[in-house]
Amino acid sequence: MYSAILLMAGKGERMKKDINKVLLPLGEKKIYEYPLKVLLETVDEVICVISEADKSLMRKFPKKVKVTFGGATRQESVMNGLKLVTNEYVLIHDAARPFITTRLIDDIKMSLNGNTNVLVGLKCKDSMKLIENSSIKNLDRDMVIRAATPQCGKTQYLLEAYKMSLEDNIQFTDDLSVLNYYYPSLETEVIFASDDLFKITTETDYLLAELIWRNYD
Ligand code: CTP
Ligand code: MG
């Protein structure tokens, strides 16, 4: 049985609009409604982590959805969501990545078993370089990935790892980094997704999302 945490309690500051970016329109819906629909079709429980200030701007959530409030950082928001999870496995997803598909979630569910975590990644298109002090090293593009979401694992481990990270006051920006830090022996499988799974972060991303939406059937 699978739960999903849908994260939408950010502020969208880099988007430079006067509302949280996940509430911006995309076609006939708001951005967050696209991933919510896909998760409702594919997992047993969806936990939406929202901002208190945004509540009145959101459509009433269906019965299957549990709602909780987020924190000041993504890390705190995930922690609040994890506290409500009742299933063995959890998929943590950014609502700012609207073009998630049921097919991808089906693939994730096939790979999520035993203690194996799943990280959804995007391929790198540019040449990748590592800057160390004043030297620049070329990296093999096929050896690096862009970490996307969903990031998935056993609820029990994620909950423990997140608790420890907040107690230790160590900042992480994604879920598998927290898990790998506290449970380094757990295996992680990477599933590649199409570029459409990019995160809407800036105005350029939003324009691209509108273009993609228009070409979706
Ligand atoms: N998020 C969250 N709680 C936070 C911060 C972020 O639930 N305190 C969510 C966002 O709503 C988003 C996802 O985590 O769906 C990824 O974060 P990001 O793209 O950084 O979104 P924002 O923090 O909203 O944007 P910005 O950093 O530009 O302010
Ligand atoms: Mg942010």
Image (tube, rainbow, N blue to C red):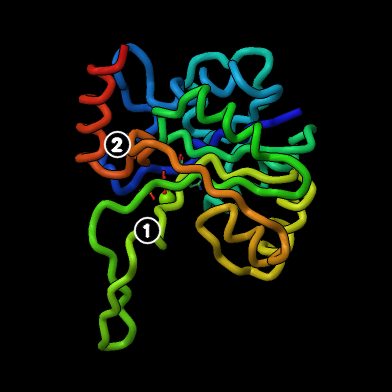
Residue 30 at what x, y percent from top left?
A: 38, 21
Residue for point 29% across, 79% down: 137
Give the residue at mark 1.
Answer: 142
The image shows residue 126, relative to residue 13, as above or below, that is below
Q: CA distance from mark 1 to mark 2?
A: 38 Å
For mark 2, give the secondary structure.
Answer: loop
| Neighbours of disc 2 within 10 Å: few (<14), some (14-19), many (20+) | few
Label drawn at residue 3: none
| Neighbours of disc 1 within 10 Å: few (<14), some (14-19), many (20+) | few
Give the residue at mark 2.
Answer: 18
Of the pair 42 and 189, the residue shown nearer to us: 189
Left or right placement of residue 95 versus residue 175 in this view: left
Q: Quadrant of residue 139?
A: bottom left
Q: Give the residue type that dot 1 points to.
A: Asp
Residue 126 at what x, y percent from top left?
A: 23, 57
Task: Decide which of tag 1 and tag 2 comes sooner along the chain.
Answer: 2
